[in-house]
Amino acid sequence: MVENFLMIFQALPYLLRGSLVTIGLVGGALFLGFIMGIPMAVGQVYGNKLIANLIFFYVWFFRGLPVLVLLFLFYFGLFSLMGLNLPAFTSAILVLGLRSAAYQSQIFRGSIQSLGEGQMLAARSLGMSKIQAIWNIILPQALRISIPGWSNEYSIILKDSAVSYAIGVMELLTRANFISTRTYKPMPVFLTCALIFLLLTYGGVKVLNLLEKKVRIPGYAYGRREI
Amino acid sequence: MQKGIDKVVVLEVEDIHKKYRGQDILKGISFKVRKGETKVIIGPSGTGKSTLLRCINQLTIPDKGRIWLEGEEVIHTKKNINQFRQKMGMVFQDFNLFDHLTALGNVEIGLTRVKRMDKDEARQKAIEELKKVGLEEQANLYPAQLSGGQKQRVSIARALAMDPKVMLFDEPTSALDPELIGEVLEVIKNLAIQGMTMILVTHEMGFARSVANEIIFMEDGKILESGPPYQLFNNPKYERTKRFLKKITELYGE
Amino acid sequence: MNEFYYFIREILLPSLFEGTLVTIKLIIFSIPLGLILGVLIAVGRVYGNRIISFLCAVYVIFFRGTPLLVQLFILYYGLPSVGIFFSPFVAAVIGFILCSCAYHSEYIRGAIQSIKSGQMMAAEALGMSRVQAILYIILPQALRRAIPGCSNEIIYLVKYSSLAFMVTCVELTGAGKIIATRYFKYTEVFLVVGIIYLLMVSVVTKFLDMLEKKLEIPGLG
Ligand SMILES: Nc1ncnc2c1ncn2[C@@H]1O[C@H](COP(=O)(O)OP(=O)(O)O)[C@@H](O)[C@H]1O
Ligand SMILES: [Mg+2]
């Protein structure tokens, strides 16, 4: 027992550096998903049929494939086919981010559609262009409504990031696995790894809840939170 | 309306007390109901009428007091209480029909699952009960497909199917649109005529007058006064009773 | 072109077929047990005493708060060190059951709590015991309401079954990886693998939609 604690204690800095990598993966993927997800959502709601259909196909593809298959497909296949020679970490961020864009776009789309047409009509009646209306009226509201869904997306991406173990990214699980094979003490190591993930999940969700409180507009109805 | 009153006491309630969050809701309620009798309980809302009915079949456990059904004390032990509840039919203000079952299913389920009657027999009996409340045509409709009045009639049929010794009605028409109240009162009136023993909480004063053997006026967790309808309506002992009756008659009409 | 066609038909598809069968087996073993455990946990959380309810909550928090892959590693690489050995397939199935039931239980719990208290009261007024009321009145309604959420979870499970390969259970993704590595045809192989997943997801989605329609009751849901 004591020696287990000692071993974990010694391994902890190494594992914690892994959680920084994990946080980097999650942050990068969420950011990419965010900046792609918003225009995709807008395109799907306000774009013409061709754009809407293209986005629909993108979403269908990225949501229908397992994250592991996407990772293999892009890391071993498509990226090099495109002449890109990307390190594992960057590849993982891109794949997780492209996939998250599919999910996030649907969160934002739901929020935009829940606003109803009245907001757009009122903005247009003031003489705003469609783009101005989207930027000044629709998105500020839609993004607030999206926070609960978004915090759910955070916890999903965080858990999915462990899959990047499969291409050798030195994140939390990869490092835990590394220590476990060296020390022959898999149980305490993987349990510690699980515990760190647990803290990251609920800690992150807590932070996002605080954010939601901060940007909350009085009298606004918000969606239901999943986790 | 006069009917032959048997001497047998079906239900006896003695000194029921109930507190919620430190506040006394029922402060010692006692009465007896004889076979074939209809007792109507009236009183302002929040007085504890629903709580009293729920205490009688132990859906709410009283803090103090005793209850006898046909001479047997109703005690809240896991095994016994379900036996007693089968013998006390309950009809709720908001129906509480089981939403996943058809009208027929609602009436059947107590028979098959609680009384363990065999399926065909239960179906036969359930259809009979639905006929009695005039709903055999609606047997295969779900609650969401029924009107409020029809829902309440199904819920009466559901309770009656268990062959209860006494029926407890908690404002059975309060959630209904005015034009649907009549059909439900009709069913209850027929039960009274057929000699069902009943306790009925209602604000329908005209109806109370016509079916009650005794009216109990409850206020603030106590029975303020009780007596036959003509006495309570024409010659109440307390000013408060008079005022309540006047107000309620203005609100609900005769 | 001919060579490519030959590769797809004679090499890729046969071995992916084997892998797909393993994937289907993984899913078919995991779904029902995951659902049943999910119901038990949900009921335990809502109707259990304080201890049971607490334990169920801790279970759900752990399994929803950690990656499935970490759970699989604990089952497959961790447990042998305390003398418990599973084959890769069994470890994967157990992992999928333990994880998915935590997610199912949350949908079911939400559904149970959304049912008006009058339903329980009416059941008890008829003389039903708690257990009878839960079994015959509460669950038939709650489970119907939970179908969309649980369907979603089942579809997730179809996709996450690919993680079984990470504990050396060669299912569809694993079979693809092996072929892709041997013939150095990653893009082609994983596109085909992806299409097979898309097909499975579509079929399962269709099936679950049909089930939902079939079980639909007016006014419930
Ligand atoms: N389950 C409960 N928990 C707490 N308070 C309750 C509960 N049920 C009833 N009460 C309170 O008891 C009082 C009497 O309620 P009730 O019996 O419904 O009155 P009535 O049916 O005469 O309108 C009310 O003040 C109500 O708020
Ligand atoms: Mg009441």
Image: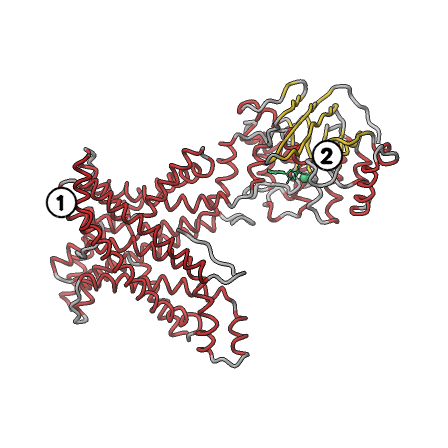
Q: In the rendered image of this protein, does residue B106 appear above or below residue A221?
A: above
- Is the CB of the residue bearing disc 2 within 8 angstroms of ligand 2? no
**For the residues tagged 1 and 2, is the chain the same?**
no
Indicate which disc residue A138 carries. Answer: none
C81 is higher (above) or lower (below) than A140: above
Using the image as rendered, state which of residue A173 and residue A102 is in the foreground.
A173
Quadrant of ligand 2: it is top right
Q: Chain of mark 1?
A: A
Above or below — where is B19 with respect to A54?
A: above
Q: Residue furthest top?
A: B71
* Residue B92 picture location, percent across and down: 65, 38
Question: How is colour applied across the structure in the image?
Answer: secondary structure
Residue nearest the viewer, comparing A95 with B190: A95
Horizontal and vertical percent position of residue B166: 69, 28
Residue C18 visible here: no
| Chain at numbered mark 2 | B
For disc 1, the neighbor class at 10 Å (few under 14, some 14 to 19, many from 20) is few
- Residue carrying label 1: A181
Q: Which residue is mark 2?
A: B200
Helix, strand or loop for disc 1: helix
> What residue is shown at x 74% (from left), y 45% (from top)?
B181
